[in-house]
Amino acid sequence: MPGTSNDAVDIAVIGAGVAGIATAYYLCSEQGKTSVVLIDPRQPMSYTSAQSGDNYRNWWPHAIMTAFTNDSIDELDRLARDSNDVFNMTRGGYVLASRKEPDREDQASGSAIASDYPWLSDEIRSVTHIRRGGDISAQQLGMYMLEKIRGCGGRLLRGAVTSIGAGRTFELEIDTGITVEAEQLVNAAGPFANYIAGMLGETLPVSNLFQQKVAFEDRLGAIRRDMPFSIDLDAKTLSWTDEERDLLADDPDLAWLTETMPGGTHCRPDGGPRGKWVKLGWAYNNKISEPQEDLANEPLADPQFPEIVMRGAADFIPALKPYIDEPPTRYSHYGGYYTMTEENWPLIGPMATDGAFMVAALSGFGSMSACAAGKLCAAWMTSNILPDYATALSRARYDDEALMQELRNATSRGIL
Ligand SMILES: Cc1cc2nc3c(=O)[nH]c(=O)nc-3n(C[C@H](O)[C@H](O)[C@H](O)COP(=O)(O)OP(=O)(O)OC[C@H]3O[C@@H](n4cnc5c(N)ncnc54)[C@H](O)[C@@H]3O)c2cc1C
């Protein structure tokens, strides 16, 4: 429904990605708010939320992120039941593979790996199988929640917020020429969350890192259709012939390809048991970007990524090796921003400005955590009962020096 020049609502949600939609969903469906408008110049779910690998897990280096994602998976389970699984939730788990010997009793080793995880390289010495993990169709989840929002009286407004006046109410100027007046606002602008914060005179401690994926048609049938999401935890150097290595090492732009790369190469079948496509990813980029309006203009999008990720994946799933010399002919290479804080925890809850809230910095875990994130923000906004982790996931955590020190000292930030 189009807005008018004097649109007045209780709540304006800026951004109709998975974060904004989930927040509006919980405001409408749980908190009884009906005067909610979602503002976005793009189609819903079409920016970062369209680039997601759609994987979910409750495996994290810190108990707070485990509790947060467990709550989100509880919500996903409930929504899957209520919607007749309209978003195709699977529960194959995450297989974490390493060449290091097992250091815990619950890790598989030796012959158990060969029999239970036969797609893994025989160099793999330990496997942890996270059971509460799998994938969803976040697009379908978003569409389902949007339908419920509309059913409660919430609506979408097409346009970009260009400035925000903050007084007794907020006045949001939209690039289409209209002004939306709102009692409360939610900053769910994904990679642009800091721009929206700037309109309120605030700065968020977030940056954007461009990460890429490849989906390809597995013409060789290299990946079993029932293979769970599999991840190589180990840092590695890519395998090159001596000649290739020398050539790369001599090129200042490409020499990094001969150096040690971080762990986290991942692979899974995509499109169900009868599908033929496979997704590969590897979030190795650590250079910060200014978010581009058009993702195709991102300077760090790397034309070599499909080859790099294939080499990385073939290193722990040898059936992929033939694709190094004869690459897939049908594939799609895409990417988007991990909008993240240094510690890789989200920012959910009140902003410094009274009446302004945020669901931001969802990094590489926004599809899996959107439900808990949206529910949490809606609870903050209505002064409802908050879960134990609410303060730690809000900007108030920066006042907790002991927690911040613990996070700074952590050996892993859970980036995949
Ligand atoms: C390559 C890749 C793989 C990923 N894989 C996974 C995965 O396997 N599992 C997982 O859980 N997560 C994954 N993620 C992370 C997940 O996709 C994101 O965390 C999530 O989509 C972020 O959602 P969002 O709503 O915050 O942002 P977005 O989807 O970017 O939505 C923000 C919206 O705000 C709008 N906006 C911006 N500025 C304005 C303005 N001025 N006015 C109005 N609207 C505005 C934008 O148009 C946009 O639609 C992945 C991300 C990437 C990039």
Image (spheres, rainbow, N blue to C red):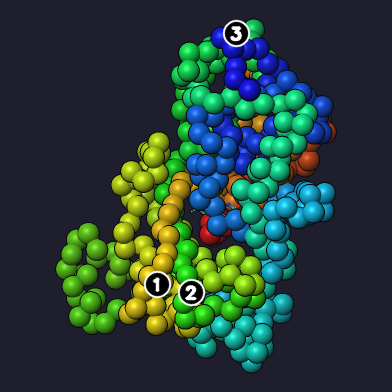
* Quadrant position of ligand 1: top right
Q: Which residue is mark 1?
A: 328
Tell me the SS state at disc 3: strand
Query: Which secondary structure, mark 2?
Result: loop
Mark closer to the chain start, 2 or 3: 3
Instruction: Give amino acid for label 1.
Output: Pro
Residue occupying the point 48% across, 74% down? 218
Q: Real-space Cα distance between discs 3 and 1?
A: 53 Å
Q: Is mark 3 within 8 Å of ligand 1?
A: no
Horizontal relation, residue 278 to residue 395: left or right: left
Tag 3: Cα neighbours inside 10 Å, few (<14), some, or many (≥20)? few
Residue sitting farthest toward the bottom: 111
Q: Is residue 104 left or right of residue 179?
A: right
Q: Quadrant of residue 388?
A: top right
Binning the other alpha carbons within 10 Å of mark 1 as few (below 14), some (14 to 19) or many (20 upward) gives some
How far apart marks 2 and 3 lie (CA) works out to 53 Å
Indicate which disc, 3 or 1, sits on the residue closer to the N terminus. Answer: 3
- Asked if the residues shown at circle 3 and circle 1 are in contact, with their CB atoms under 8 angstroms apart, the answer is no
Residue annotated with mark 3: 6
Please report whichever mark, 1 or 2, sits nearer to the chain's N-terminal start.
2
**SS at badge 1:** loop
Where residue 125 appears, x then y in whole percent? 57, 84
Q: Is residue 290 above or below residue 54?
A: above
Give above or below for 151 relative to 209. above
Amino acid residing under circle 3: Asn
The residue pinned by badge 2 equals: 218
Q: How many marks?
A: 3
